[in-house]
Image (tube, rainbow, N blue to C red):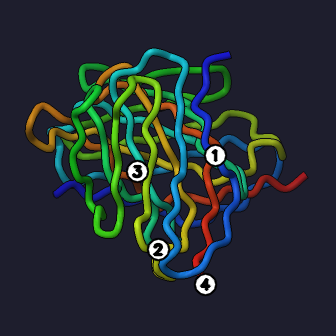
Amino acid sequence: KQEVTQIPAALSVPEGENLVLNCSFTDSAIYNLQWFRQDPGKGLTSLLLIQSSQREQTSGRLNASLDKSSGRSTLYIAASQPGDSATYLCACYAYSGAGSYQLTFGKGTKLSVIP
Amino acid sequence: EAQVTQNPRYLITVTGKKLTVTCSQNMNHEYMSWYRQDPGLGLRQIYYSMNVEVTDKGDVPEGYKVSRKEKRNFPLILESPSPNQTSLYFCASSLSTGNEQYFGPGTRLTVT
């Protein structure tokens, strides 16, 4: 069964710094990988989806990479801002049988950007 | 606006009193799913639906029921809620299984 790990669980950085969030997964036969942002008490906002055939995806200051062979994905945030403070979740789609792909989540990295 | 909506957003109830949390999407998505989020355990899938009248269990289905009579709606039913079902619940939808999922705002349920 797929397991997704995100380290560190929490990260605090000064404003303006570039940073990398890490995600590792145990089963390299993933279909897609999705990064989400969750603000306290709120729902999940999709940031980026990387298909298994892709190596990376970019959206504004965000860049996500995928290395299936090593079971790793990274989310790079450029020039961090206080508004980036949130919990970032990594989730993998893997085949679960009967034509269905199940989404398995990591426990997230809580990011604090200090002004 | 394309969205997934859930109601109610907050609910406090007592053990054993049946309740339903509604979920609706306006994107004509085939795939819908329910998750619960608990501290230290993360998000776990409860049930999912590949299309109308097609539902299946996720990782933590015990104590829950679902139905998918219309494409846009996917209600979550707790026939006899217990305190261990106190949690934050999310509904999500996608064009089809394996594609980008869009999440609702969440329903915070407390069972006393």
Amino acid under disc 3: Cys
Q: Dots 4 and 1: beta carbons under 8 Å?
A: no
Kindly identify the amino acid type of the residue bearing the numbered disc 4. Thr
Q: CA distance from mark 3 to mark 4?
A: 36 Å
Image location of residue A25, percent across then percent down: 28, 52
Q: Which residue is mark 1?
A: B7
Element class at badge 1? strand
Tell me: residue A33, above or below residue B52. Answer: below
Coordinates of residue B102 in the picture (x, y in percent): 51, 31
Disc 4 or 2, which lies upstream in sequence?
Answer: 2
Give the letter of the chain under mark 3.
Answer: A
Can you identify the residue that label 4 sits on? B112
Q: Against B69, is A115 above or below? A: below
- Single out the residue that lies furthest toward the right: A115
Q: Residue at x 55, y 45 (%)?
A: A20
Please tell me the numbered disc located at residue A54: none
Residue topped by disc 3: A23
Which chain's residue wears label 2?
Answer: B
> Within 10 angstroms of label 2, few (less than 14), some, or many (20 or more) residues?
many
- Using the rendered image of the protein, determine whether residue B99 is visible from the camera's viewpoint: yes
How far apart are the two marked residues, 4 and 2, measured between alpha carbons?
A: 9 Å
Query: In the drawing, does residue B53 fall left or right of residue A29?
Result: right
